[in-house]
Amino acid sequence: MIAGTGPARLSACCVSGSVSQASSTPPTTLVDGVWEALRTVRDPELDNDVVSLDFVADCSVTEDGIAHVRLRLPTYFCAPNFAFLMVADAWDAVSQVDGLADVDVALIDHFASDAINAGVAARAGFVHSMAGSEVGEAVEELHELRRSFTERAMMAGTDLVVRPLMRAGATPEQVAGMTLGDAPDSADLRRLRARRSELGIPADDDAPLVVDPVGRTVGLEALPLHLRKARSYQVGVDANTSICRGQLAARYGL
Amino acid sequence: MYEKDGEKYFIVDSHMHYWDASPENWVQGAEQYAKGWIECFHAYQGLGPAETHQPLEEFQKVSEEQLMRQEFEEGHVDVAILQSTYLREWYKNGFNTSERNGYLAEKYPGKFILNTRFDPRDGDAGMREFEENVRRYGAIGAKLYTAEWNGDSRGFKLTDPEAYRFLQRAEELGVKNIHVHKGPTIWPLDKDAFDVSDVDHAATDFQGLNFIVEHVGLPRIEDFCFMATQEPNVYAGLSVVIGGLMHARPKFFAKVMGELLFWVGEDKMTFGSDYNIWEPKWQVEGFVDWTMPDDDQFADYPRLDTNGKKKILGLNAAKLYGIEVPAECQITEGQPAAQDDAQLVEDRSVAPA
């Protein structure tokens, strides 16, 4: 199972690394480490982390060092494939926190909770986890799905980085010739670099600013349509996020 | 009909339901799904104005009287299109079947259009049921729920050979408006239930059918847009878009509308309240009052004028269903240039950003 990646993940490792040096770390610090780790876990569809999305219903560490994490989703029928990815990623990320004796991550209030929780706990893949379950069988693992959503996130991220440049007066000719290093540093740019790295697309300063989902440079002629589509992806992510947040708030009275 | 500032709007609610999700109708052993489903719908209602929220018990099964009042008396609706959704795996008598909807349609002639449904996985028996429903209710439309559970199956695609057999028969029977649910709420396991590529293929292969994609493929609205812009017989069903976003998230609503107006165009967008998730009243009134914000970030989106709103709220659906529209509600002056239905993405002028 692929764990959540990206720069936030590195900071979580640093946090857990410093924690590990003190063997008598009080649970409050361990809990902070667990929260940090959870911040590296993304909803692939919304391209946002499960802490920011308020998907963490409960997070605690017992006296004997067992981390308990409960994840919740906006609806009972949220897509089980994404749910599985998030639970598995949360398990992996929290397991990286040094000083914990054990990890217990579970999804609550979901139609496929039992199958997903048992499968993740057993380190089984999605297909194996669903086999024979009451809610049905899966035929494919989720690597392709994750890839496809990282591609969408990259397209949406391109819009967030390039639109401000063009509104500030950059011409299509200039944008087509720019590298990542030419764009001013921002949280959006760092996120775009992270998504590109996950896709195996160069993300260093010398790499072209605008590329397609397989990493090819987008020429001047194709640029307007490419950016128009990038904007549609970004609007899609925004719209989904707002619906999901609204559903979660309605469901849990937030 | 809705009248505002001297303009008369003919309202077709092209996507609504008369469901029974009360506990008495839950299938034994599947109660958690029946309950989860309707609670999921109920949470959607939470995205509408607070004064329209219903207690869960009322929401599970509204009365005939309440539906008639909220659709036609208070909701400004002239004609409502009942969309059948079976879900018999979870609801004993179905969620809202052709029979249940048919009761209303037969009792109130002229008020409703009844869309039946088919499920290609039901084979020959399903085909006979479909044919019978078309005959009995004079249906010219059908609602397809590609993510519906059926036995061991957790969904189907329009491109399945069995589905093509039904689409072919639908065309022969004159069932020309195929509403496809591509949107939130139930999902098969690993299949991407929102994937609209099957609609793309079916729309190309069945030029005599119209495909109205309900909920515009949310959460994959962009895939829907890129597809719909190339298929002259694909429409955007705005159920959930108006109900779920216009009140709760007006800024995102404006952006989604901007995307749809740009890629799909006002001639191919149809209003649907998704009743009883949301009542039509606030949606119709709010949509008539709505304008694309002047803010810089919306500058390159197409504008929507009164005529465009008239089309979306009723005239487009009236055309699809052959509903007679009073002259006073027709578009009479200053018609904007219509979108060329067959225009391809590559031909559109694409604003840079």
Image (cartoon, coloured by chain):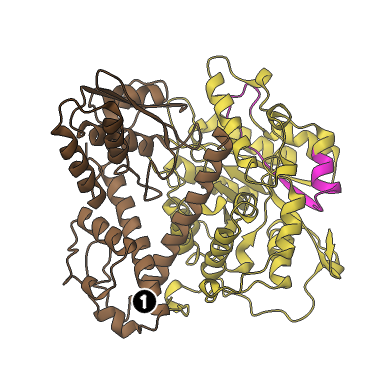
Chain colours: A brown, B yellow
At 62% from the left and 20% from the top, the residue drawn is: B26
At 29% from the left and 44% from the top, the residue drawn is: A40
Q: Is residue A110 rendered to the left or right of residue B114?
A: left
The span picked out in magenta is B67-94
Q: Is residue A89 visible?
A: no
Provide the residue designation for mark 1. A165
Q: Nearer the viewer, residue B258 or A221?
A: B258
The quadrant of the picture occupied by the N terminus of chain A is: top left
Q: Is residue B112 rendered to the left or right of residue A173?
A: right
Q: Is residue B211 rendered to the left or right of residue B67?
A: left
Callout 1: SS: helix
Which image quadrant for residue B340?
bottom right
The quadrant of the picture occupied by the C terminus of chain A is: top right
- Local packing at callout 1 (Cα closer than 10 Å; few below 14, some 14-19, many 20+) is some
Is B91 magenta? The answer is yes
At 53% from the left and 25% from the top, the residue drawn is: B33
Q: Is residue A65 above or below residue A174?
A: above
